[in-house]
Image: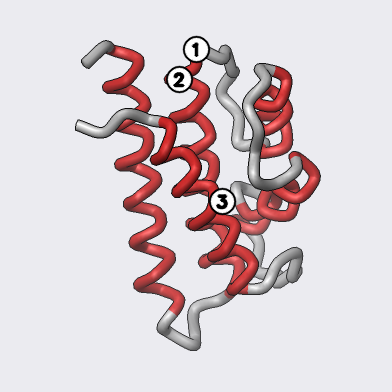
Amino acid sequence: MTPRIDEAQLFLRLANDDRDAFHVLKIAPHIKLRILCFHAQQAVEKSLKAVMLLQEIPFRKTHDLNLLANLIAESGLSLLYSPEDLTNLNPHSVTFRYDDIEIDTLTREEAESMMESIMRWATGLVPQE
């Protein structure tokens, strides 16, 4: 494998770790939505970055899913969600992580569906070992 494929695969493995955390936490009714959405956001972010690494789309260090999605769209790749749709997960990367507030930008089901769809899309693009 090439270094860019290896790095893309690493990002997908890290995304899988966040997806696993999401699934473990979602069955506990006392876990707050903001915690679940943090892991969904992280899985989506790492999946987008995996594709960007593979396609050699430059990006800076960011948690902004809207920015990443726009860069992917500008490269000619089609996303399952618009950059604006992905914006609903953005506040969960940092903003809500350090606050004890609940702002429902997504339901648990919507966050899970978005995360799973993006991860399937990315996994389909990145060659597997």
Residue 126: percent from the left, percent from the top? Answer: 38, 30
Residue at the location (32% across, 23% down)? 7
Q: Amino acid at mark 1?
A: Glu
Mark 3 vs 1, N-terminal side? 3
Q: Which residue is mark 2?
A: 53
Mark 3 vs 2, N-terminal side? 3
Q: Nearer the viewer, mark 3 or mark 1?
A: 1
Residue 28: percent from the left, percent from the top? Answer: 42, 84
Image quarter (top left, top right, bottom left or bottom right) of the C terminus: top left
Extreme residue toward the bottom, this view: 29
| Circle 1/circle 2 CB separation < 8 Å | yes
Q: Which residue is mark 1?
A: 56
Residue at the location (54% across, 40% down)? 45
Image quarter (top left, top right, bottom left or bottom right) of the N terminus: top left
Asked if residue 124 is positioned above or below residue 55 in the image, the reply reads below
- Locate residue 3 relative to residue 23 in the image: left or right: left
Q: Amino acid at mark 2?
A: Leu
Q: Which image quarter: residue 99?
A: bottom right
Q: How is the image coloured?
A: secondary structure
Q: In terms of secondary structure, where does tag 2 sit?
A: helix
Q: CA distance from mark 1 to mark 2?
A: 5 Å
Q: CA distance from mark 3 to mark 2?
A: 18 Å
Q: Which residue is mark 3?
A: 41
- Locate residue 65 relative to residue 15 in the image: left or right: right
Residue 71: percent from the left, percent from the top? Answer: 68, 22
Q: CA distance from mark 3 to mark 1?
A: 22 Å
Q: In terms of secondary structure, where does tag 3 sit?
A: helix
Q: Amino acid at mark 3?
A: Gln
| Circle 3/circle 2 CB separation < 8 Å | no
Residue at the location (39% across, 45% down)? 15
Residue 105: percent from the left, percent from the top? Answer: 75, 64
